[in-house]
Image (spheres, rainbow, N blue to C red):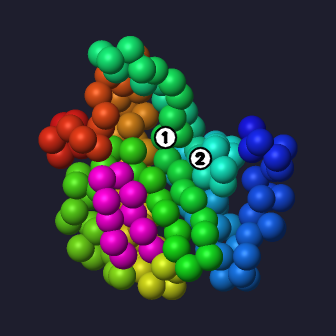
């Protein structure tokens, strides 16, 4: 999949500002590809995603989301945990320098964190969302559900 400018993931990464941002994005691609076993795809304006799931809410809204993904920007990497950051609070305490919101994990650069802990968090998130999706469309916003829908 490509973005609206028809760039591939590798072209998009090569176009990023800053060598550190490019290196961090390439590392995240390797980690997420290893976890998912899937090729990366571009979503929206610069989100790199792996895997898809279908959602259909009672409101009638439905669509496709990426199972795991990230958005690389200079000075801030956003890693999407579609099951929410709350489910991962114990591991996040071991991660290193970061901030979070509902389903976003923000890291300035990968050298600020423990990559093995990040990999465990992303793996757990991927497995949880993929397992939920196997039962059919996800009907709840996982990160808003108590403890990520458990």
Q: Is residue 128 above or below residue 78?
A: above
Q: Are marks 2 and 1 in contact (CB under 8 Å)?
A: yes
Of 26 and 84, nearer the camera is: 84
Residue occupying the point 30% across, 16% down? 58
Residue receiving disc 2? 49
Residue 29 percent across, percent down from the top left = 63, 59
**Horizontal side, residue 108 vs residue 84: left or right:** right
Residue 115 percent across, percent down from the top left = 46, 74
**Horizontal side, residue 66 vs residue 99: left or right:** right
Region rendered in magenta: 98-107
Residue occupying the point 39% across, 57% down? 104
Q: Quadrant of residue 131?
A: top left
Q: Is residue 60 above or below residue 68?
A: above
Q: Secondary structure at mark 2?
A: strand
The mark nearer the N terminus, 2 or 1, is: 2
Q: Is residue 106 magenta?
A: yes
Return the mark for residue 113: none
Q: Quadrant of the N terminus?
A: top right
**Horizontal side, residue 82 vs residue 50: left or right:** left
User: Is residue 65 at all visible to an observer of this figure?
Assistant: yes
What kind of secondary structure does the magenta stretch mostly adopt?
A: strand
């Amino acid at each position: 999949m490509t973005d609206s400018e028809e760039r591939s993931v590798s072209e998009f990464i090569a176009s990023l500002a800053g060598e550190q941002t490019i290196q961090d994005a390439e590392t995240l691609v390797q980690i997420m590809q290893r976890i998912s076993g899937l090729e990366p795809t571009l979503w929206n304006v610069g989100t790199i995603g792996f895997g898809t799931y279908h959602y259909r809410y009672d409101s009638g809204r439905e669509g496709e989301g990426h199972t795991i993904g990230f958005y690389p920007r200079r000075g801030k990497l956003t890693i999407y945990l579609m099951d929410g950051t709350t489910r991962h609070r114990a591991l996040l305490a071991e991660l290193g320098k970061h901030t979070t919101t509902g389903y976003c994990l923000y890291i300035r650069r990968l050298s600020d964190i423990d990559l093995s802990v990040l990999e465990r968090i992303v793996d757990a998130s991927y497995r949880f969302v993929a397992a939920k999706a196997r039962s059919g469309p996800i009907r709840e916003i996982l990160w808003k559900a108590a403890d990520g829908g458990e």
